[in-house]
Image (cartoon, rainbow, N blue to C red):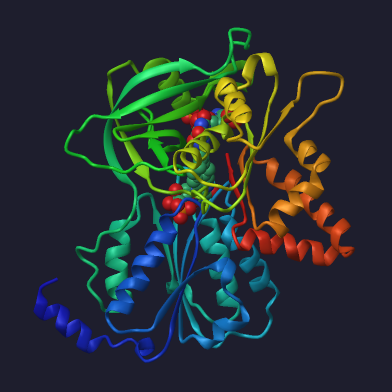
Amino acid sequence: MNQFSFYLKNLLFTPIYEQGDILIGYASQTGTAKGLAEKSAELLQASGRSASCLPLSQVSVEELDNYQQVLIFVSTYGHGEFPDNGIAFFDRLCERTNPLNTKVDIFAIGDRNYGLFCEAGKLLHEQFIRLEAAHDNNLQLVDGAPYQRWQQWFADYSGLNPDGSVLDGPVQLAMTLTERGELHSQHCSIERGAYRLRFTLAQTDKTIQFQSGDLIGVVPPNETLERLYSVSDVFDDGVELCIGKVVYQQGEVEVVGKCSDYLINRLSLNQPIEVSHRAQGGLVLPKPQQPLLMVATGTGIAPMMCLLRERVATGASASNWLVFGNRHSEQDFYYQQDLEQMRSSGQLSRLDLAFSREGDKKVYVQDKLQQNRQHVLRWLLDDNGLLYVCGQPMLKSAIREVLVQALQERLGDATEAKVQYQQLLDKQQIVYELY
Ligand SMILES: Cc1cc2nc3c(=O)[nH]c(=O)nc-3n(C[C@H](O)[C@H](O)[C@H](O)COP(=O)(O)OP(=O)(O)OC[C@H]3O[C@@H](n4cnc5c(N)ncnc54)[C@H](O)[C@@H]3O)c2cc1C
Ligand SMILES: Cc1cc2nc3c(=O)[nH]c(=O)nc-3n(C[C@H](O)[C@H](O)[C@H](O)COP(=O)(O)O)c2cc1C
């Protein structure tokens, strides 16, 4: 758009919300929707408009009426689910009956490779239509990398020109696989186990700062769907990933996971590969004085290793407690040596292990939390500690059950216990990264 037509457009298209407050809410699991929301707020503020930007977990449905205009950025996770910081807002929205006195636009991001495309955005939109705050044309559905679509759409929405604005989105990088080693022992069965892979930046001109909590995206050959991997260690010139084998049954046939097999078996050493780098997913480095309880199963240990190493390297004073679970201690106790060393040096104040296929009774990480529930509550409620969970999707309901029950014991009230648990989620004192 040239300057004249842009000026004309601004003149003709004077949005009604120019005098009023704009609320920008987001629900985001790995930071993309959050980045778009923050950039939109920044541009609106720079143009003199009053815009606030909040995760939906901090937005009250009743307060929506205080804004002339509401703009929501939302991604979809799991199988058509909301990101964690959007779940409670959606539940409250569904309960509201009286119409809203505001106008809501939704910018929904997703990926058509998943069954329920942009489902969270569609569900929100349905509710806002019911509450008379949106029409059909107030929903944008965006497939894949959303930055270009956002630029076009934001220009129309706001009358502002976002060209040239830099978003903290995924960055494409050329890297080279420089080391690969087993994390499981030789006793591990052939279809299980995990590998540590060291990748080094192939471009010498790139200066990227890798941090714990970052994610690396890989698209295997002949595929379109990107797989994400947490960094398990960071270096000036690269990262380490921890990749688990994936094997599943398709009828009679055993099939291997496409990306994990590519990274473990087919990508050669010293072969360059294009990856994407997403800074800071959900498991961000806590404040140095904040206690950290980490619960990990299988390759869920990856982000925890990185957090632990960074906490140690930066001299964080608060305690680190790890609960790790897998099947067999003698087969798949990943990073055993590092963890035992950290435990004996006191860098890990506590290490609980739950190997499910040993002994007569199966023991899972949630059982360890259940046994130590009073201690867990002290960490969360009295010491303002964090609980990070990474591993299988079923961990969310299992850990929720343990914590709600423990809170109920402490508070003596079931409803209050659920509210407190939700508050811990909303304040991001409890963060799940599940896959
Ligand atoms: C935020 C995040 C962080 C992650 N971090 C890590 C990490 O650090 N380490 C790690 O190893 N993984 C991690 N993952 C998981 C990773 O992204 C991949 O999902 C995993 O490697 C499997 O991908 P794949 O291509 O090997 O398997 P795919 O080929 O995509 O198959 C994956 C699964 O899909 C199912 N499936 C696929 N096709 C079929 C079919 N036709 N029939 C039945 N079932 C089917 C199977 O259950 C199979 O287990 C993370 C995921 C997320 C979202
Ligand atoms: C594990 C996983 C599950 C996903 N499930 C869906 C889905 O069901 N529907 C969809 O449209 N997109 C799905 N996506 C794609 C995300 O919505 C998309 O990558 C989005 O850009 C992420 O935004 P965020 O970083 O703000 O969370 C999924 C992505 C991942 C990694």
Q: Vertical placement of 169 versus 155: above or below? A: above
**308 to the left or right of 14:** right
Residue at left offset 51%, top offset 85%: 102
**389 to the left or right of 311:** right
Q: Vertical placement of 210 versus 187: above or below? A: below
Q: Measured from the top left, where is residue 372 in percent x and y?
A: 80, 42
Q: Is residue 114 visible?
A: no
**93 to the left or right of 408:** left
Q: Is residue 72 visible?
A: yes
Q: Quadrant of the C terminus?
A: top right
Residue at left offset 59%, top offset 58%: 428
Identity of the residue furthest to the bottom in this view: 19
Residue at left offset 56%, top offset 75%: 128
Q: Measured from the top left, where is residue 192 in percent x and y?
A: 60, 18
Task: Name the one closer to the observer, 76 or 165.
Answer: 165
Residue at left offset 20%, top offset 33%: 203
Q: Measured from the top left, where is residue 325 in percent x and y?
A: 68, 30
**88 to the left or right of 161:** right
Q: Vertical placement of 131 versus 346: above or below? A: below
- Tally of numbered discs: 0
Q: Vertical placement of 423 versus 198: above or below? A: below
Task: Name the one closer to the observer, 136 or 380.
Answer: 380
Identity of the residue furthest to the top in this view: 186
Q: Measured from the top left, where is residue 112 in percent x and y?
A: 45, 47
